[in-house]
Amino acid sequence: MKIGIIGAGNIGGNLTRRLTALGHEVSVANSRGPHTLTELAEETGTTPVRVEEAARGAGIVIVAVPLKAVPDLPKGLFDEAADDVVVVDTCNYYPRQRDGRIAAIEDEGLTESRWTEQQLGHPVVKAFNATYAQDLLERPRPAGDPDRIALPVAGDDEAAKAKVRALIDELGFDTVDTGGLDDSWRQQPGTPVSGMRGDVEAVTRALEAASPERPADFRG
């Protein structure tokens, strides 16, 4: 599959490493330009591109940038993607540490991914935001392995969500359906599932135990 990754930090970089190793055709972009991705390209065989080109022909596009950078992404970003492109949002909101206060999230009660969807002008599936980047490299397990961990996935489009869950299965992880995008608060930072290394049952319990009230450390 052709996959575009926007953002080459911890999550974006490790997804590039894993997905190229699995044989996917990966294009990766960051805000500093393709020339800064030479080392990652040499390591993985990925194709460094400009952000404007990252989605070209892609069946899946993974957005892995700081939340505050989402509005700065180019307009029409998905115009040259596959007709049925699925956009994956890995972003988390850290108002105190990085992103500043976003009124629509704080005052209007939008989930982080609903806000991201509005900024991108395209539906998104929320995934990879509740796991440690290093676990993408170190914790894959075959299906049925007792040590295989599960990742939460939220989205409104069931077909798109199924496509992302299949990719995560290929990466070596189980998944738990969090529900629609308006339910994705259950996997935001500060919830029980954030950073959890648990199986399907444990992750399901953690999602059910989540509170819609954002913890003080994650409010602007």
Image: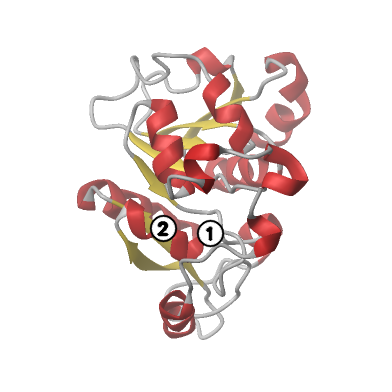
Q: Residue at x 46, y 37 (%)?
A: 116
Q: Secondary structure at mark 2?
A: helix
* Residue 161 percent across, percent down from the top left: 30, 52
Q: Residue furthest front?
A: 107
Q: Which mark is residue 114?
A: none
Q: Nearer the viewer, residue 126 or 108?
A: 108
Q: Quadrant of residue 78?
A: top left
Say above or below: 71 vs 154: above
Q: Nearer the viewer, residue 139 or 93?
A: 93
Report the amino acid beneath label 2: Ser
Q: Residue at x 32, y 37 (%)?
A: 123
Relative side of 214 to 84, left or right: right
Task: Evaluate whether residue 124 shows in this view.
Answer: yes
Say above or below: 113 vs 44: below
Give the residue number, with chain letter if any, for mark 2: 184
Task: Evaluate whether residue 166 shows in this view.
Answer: no
Q: Nearer the viewer, residue 178 or 185?
A: 185
Q: Nearer the viewer, residue 159 or 192?
A: 192
User: Badge 2 local density, few (<14 within 10 Å), some, or many (20+)?
Assistant: many
Report the amino acid beneath label 1: Gln
Say above or below: 26 vs 94: above
Query: Colour scheme in the image?
Result: secondary structure
* Residue 138 percent across, percent down from the top left: 68, 64
* Residue 197 percent across, percent down from the top left: 60, 75
Q: Residue at x 59, y 17 (%)?
A: 49
Q: Secondary structure at mark 1?
A: loop
Q: Which mark is residue 188?
A: 1
